[in-house]
Image (tube, grey):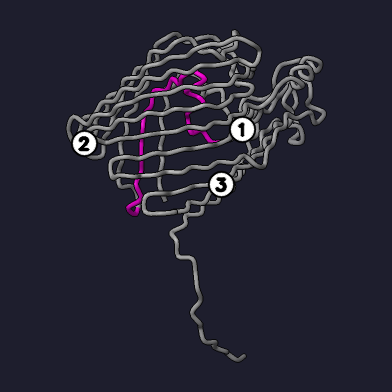
Amino acid sequence: MRSRFYRLEKVLVDDRSHEMTMVFRRKKQRFSGDRLGGRDEPVSTDVVPQSRMVLMTFEDRIPLTAQLTARAGFQGMKLSNRVANATSLDNDERLRMRDWFMPRATVIWSPKANVDLMIDYRESLTGYGETGRTGPMAMTREEFRAWSRNFRPERHSRLRFDAEWRPSTDLDLAVTAFQGRIDNRMLFIDRGYLPVNGGSANLQGATISIRHRLSSRWHWSMRYGATQLNRTEGGRATEQGMTVQAGWSSGPWSASLSGTRSSQAALLHEAAGSRGPMHIEGALRYEIAGFDRMPLNVSLRLTDLSQLAGDKLLRHDLSGIAPATDHARGLMLNVGCSW
């Protein structure tokens, strides 16, 4: 065997600091129940209810100038629920959805050190994926087929503009204006896992927020938002909400508590129920060094997500599965480790 060496020549390269991100995620959930549909014997694995999701994300960060940065990319997703109904154990009636191109783009301009301007557009898709978690639905075959013909995944398309000004190191002011559309708002029957359609609407609105650091440990913030909705089924509605939050941090410990008072949600199915005007959320976190200097985060969170369509459209939720637990009040213990 002979070794052969070649001389390396200089070549021209584009040395801009690109940050290209590609993520491919595949998830499968199988229902753990051994008996389905009133059967006494264990069910074959061929008919076990399951949910499968494939999510692909591609994004490139491109610094155009010292003050101007752009991000562009897209997401693609496929979601399938197998044996989604209790009367379909011996056949392959599935709930399917897919979209392989949902674009997203962001441009950030910082004309001054304390001023940031951003324009952002994105599309997203959310589907039902509880079959692998809660098992099949308890419908007759005719009811399921009629329901599945009308059931659609929730789609978002949104354009937003953000302006943030920091007049001092302890004070942040931000204004957001947005417009977009929500198709087939997916909700869940109160204390249940059956999805219902809350309707579709065009939205436009604005929010204003302030954040003040009182000391190195304490801070507080306030946010007010208003959204105008034009329902596809006809009629107009207005949503309003105000949130006040306080936060504290000391060493590895941090805590936050927020209270929100809001109007009635405009896209809300009567079967989903309303939670009232007040919402309380909080979190207690502790971060330790972990193993081999890898941080370990432990948190206890009280969650009560807003039902307002405007808040849902503004959240940076990724495409994927919408679990019923995300729509309910809950107390969650999370443990995370960074590798």
> Can residue 316 be found in the magenta stretch?
yes
> Can residue 137 be found in the magenta stretch?
no
> Closer to the camera, 174 or 43?
174
Q: Position of residue 335 (x, y in %)?
A: 40, 37
For discs 2 and 3, the disc positioned in front in the rendered view: 2
Q: Which residue is mark 2?
A: 168
Q: Position of residue 331 (x, y in %)?
A: 41, 23
| Quarter assignment of residue 122 | top right
Dot 1, how many residues are within 10 Å of its Cα: few (below 14), some (14-19), or many (20+)?
A: many
Local secondary structure at mark 2: strand
* Circle 1/circle 3 CB separation < 8 Å: no
For discs 1 and 2, the disc positioned in front in the rendered view: 2
Dot 3, how many residues are within 10 Å of its Cα: few (below 14), some (14-19), or many (20+)?
A: some
Give the mark nearest the N terminus, 2 or 3.
Answer: 3
Residue furthest bottom as drawn? 2
How far apart, in angstroms, are the residues tagged by discs 2 and 3? Answer: 34 Å
Residue 125's tag is: 1
Q: Is residue 88 left or right of residue 322?
A: right
> Closer to the camera, 283 or 202?
202
Q: Amino acid at mark 3?
A: Gly
Q: Which residue is mark 3?
A: 73
> Closer to the camera, 65 or 35?
65
Report the magenta residues as a range: 292-318
Q: Amino acid at mark 2?
A: Ser
| Quarter assignment of residue 54 | top right
Q: Amino acid at mark 1?
A: Leu
